[in-house]
Image (spheres, grey):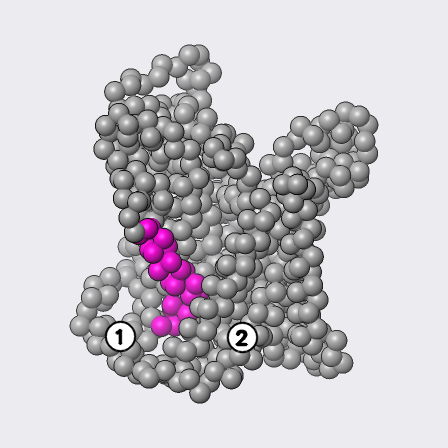
Amino acid sequence: MQGGLRWNAPFGVGAVFASAIVLAFLAAGVLQPDLLNWGGIPQLGRFFVASLRPEMSWEILAITWDATRLTFAYAVCGTCLSVLLGTVGGLFCSEVWWAAIGKLAGFPFFRFVRALLAIPRSIHELIWGLLFVNLWGTESLTAVLAIAIPFGAITTKVFAEILDETPRQPLYALLNSGTPPLSAFCYSLLPQAWLNLLSYGFYRFECAIRSAAVLGMIGAGGLGYQILLSLQSLRYEQVWTFIYALLLLNGLVDFASAWLRRQLGCASRLDLNLPQSIGRKLTIAQRSCKNRFQNFQPFSFALTTPHTPHPIPQSTELWLIRLKTAVSTYLLLIVCLVLIGFSFWYVDADFSQMWATKTWRLLGEMVQASLPPDLSILPQLVRLSLQTIVMSVLAIALAGIGGMVLSFPAAYTIVLPGGLLNPTAGGWLGMVLSWSVLLLTRFLLLLSRAVPAPVWALVVLFVLFPGILPGAIALGIHNFGILGRLKAEVVENLDERPLTALKAQGVPGALIFLYGVLPLTLPRFLAYDLYRWEVCMRETAIVGIVGAGGLGYLMNEQLSSFDYQGLIVTLTCFLALTFGIDWLSAIARRALR
C-alpha cells in the first residue's frame, strides 16, 4: 500500500496542479478577444532585430565594463554576507545542534528561529531595496544589504536542512566519548556536509548575479540600471549590448560553478526531494561528495577522531587525487579571497550607516507613519491577492513545462553521440548537429534566466496590455531558464544502470526515454517546479513595478507615495500568501518522496 502511494503521488500532485493551471488560465483572460496589442508588434520586431547589431562604440563598451564590474561586486558582497549569516544561523537553526548540546527536550528554539527567519526570506530583495532607498538612497549599501538579508535567511534555512539530513552516527560517537559539542561538529558533521554546503553557496552566488541586475533597476547602478535606461529611451542596440554583457557574466559564473562541482565531485548545485531512508542514509550524490572529500589530505582529519592520525595514502593514484583536490581547493580559496576583497573595495559600502543616528531616526519615522494600519484597502487586497496567485501559477506552469521540454536536449547524456537518443556516432555531421542542438538549447536557457524578469515584462508589454498575463509570461520566461538548467542536471545525473539494462536488451531509444527516463525524472521535476513556485510568488513583486498587476504593483505605488499605512497591510497580506504557498509546496514535495 505504501509503495502504491509512493508511485501514485507524482500523478496525484500533477492532477491537482493541472486543474489549478487551467483555472488560472481562464482567470487570466487568455480567451479574451482583445488580448493582443497589435500596434506594438513592430516595436517588438525592432527590439529583436537590434539583437543582431548591438552598439559596440568605445563609450558604450566602457559603460558596459563599469556596469558589469559593479553588478559582479554587488553579487559577491551580498553572497559573502549571506553565507556568513547562513553558516552561523544554519548551525543554531538545525535540530541536530540542539540535540547535540542536550537542549532539545525543552522549548524548540530552533523552530522558533526558523519561523522568524521566514519573514525576511519571504520579502523579495527588490522590496528590501526599495525600503532601504528611503533610508540611504541609492548608495551601494542599499544593494548589498538588499541581497544579503533575504539570501542570508534562505541560506540559513537550507544550511540547517543540510546539517539535519547529514548522517549523525560519527557525531554521536564523539559526543559519547566526551568530546565537546562544537568540536564534535567540526570533526564529524561539518566535513560530511561541507561539499553540499559549498555547492549550494555557489548556487546562491548565481542567484545573486541575477538579483544584483534587478536591484540596478531601482537606481543602484550596474547592468540592470543601464538596461532600463536604454529600454526606456528605445535604444535597443544599447539594450542588447548590456544584455550580452549580463549573459556573458552569468555564463562565466555558471561554467565556473559547474567546473568546480565536477572537480570536487558534487553532482548538482541544488538537490531537492531525494529519497531518504529512516536511517538517513547518504544519497548517491552525497556519497560521491563524501568520498571525494575523504581523498583530500589537508582536511582528512575531520573524518576521524581528534586523536586519530591522518590516513596514509594506499597508492599513487590516491595520492594524486588528494593532491589534485588540495591544489584545486587552495586555488579556489585564494581566488575567492581576492574577489571578495576587490568587491568590498570596489562597492565601497559605508556599513556605519546601519547604526547611524539618521538611519534610526528615519526608521522610527517610517514605523510611526505606518501606524495605525490602513485596513480600508482589504477589499482591494482580496482581488489583488487572487491576481497574484493566478500570476504565480501561470508562471510556474509555463516555466515548468518549458524547462522540462528543453532539459532533455540540454543534457549531454541525451543528444550527444553515445547518448540515449543518439547511441551511435553518426559521423562528423551527426556530431555537429548534436552539439549544435545542445549548445543552442543551453544558450536559450542562459538567455532566459540571465535577463531580469522586469525586462522581460517590459518586452511582453509591447504586445500585451497591462495585467497579470504579461507578468506571468515574464516570470515564466525567466524561471524557465533556471528550471531547464536544474532539470538538465537531473537528467545528466540519473542512475544509468536501469537504462543500460534496457539498452542491452535492444530497446529503442524512444522507449527507453518513455519508460526509463521519464519515470525517473518526473518526481524530481515536480519537486523543482514546486520549489520555484515559492520563488515565483516572491518574484511577482518585481514585475509589479512595471505595471504587471498584483500586490507588487500596489506595493510599488505605496512606496512611491510614502503610504506606509497601506504598505504595512499589503506587505502582511503578501507574507501570508507566501507562507501559504510555502506550506502547500512543502506538503506536495513530501508527498513526492
Q: Residue 67: x percent and y percent?
A: 42, 61
Whole-percent x, y for residue 410 in the image: 65, 45
Left or right: 73, with 424 as reference point: left
| The C terminus, quarter of image | top right
At label 2, counting other C-alpha atoms closer than 10 Å, the crowd grade (few under 14, some 14-19, many 20 or more) is some
Tell me the residue at 55%/72% (across/down): 388
Residue 589 in the image: state x and y as whole percent.
56, 50
In the rendered image, the residue lying farthest to the bottom is 376
**Compared with residue 327, is residue 539 higher up or lower down, i.e. above or below?**
below
The quadrant where residue 65 appears:
bottom left
Distance, label 2 to label 1, CA atoms, is 28 Å
Task: Evaluate if marks 2 and 1 touch, with contact meaning CB atoms under 8 Å apart.
Answer: no
Label 1 amino acid?
Leu
Q: Return the mark for residue 345.
A: none
What residue is shown with label 2? 385
The extreme left residue here reads 357
Q: Can residue 37 be seen?
A: yes
| In-front residue for pair 247/583 | 583
Q: Quadrant of the N terminus?
A: top right
| Vertical placement of residue 271 versus 121, above or below | above
| Residue under the point 27% across and 81% down | 368
SS at mark 1 in the image: helix
The residue labelled by disc 1 is 363
Residue 109 among magenta residues: yes
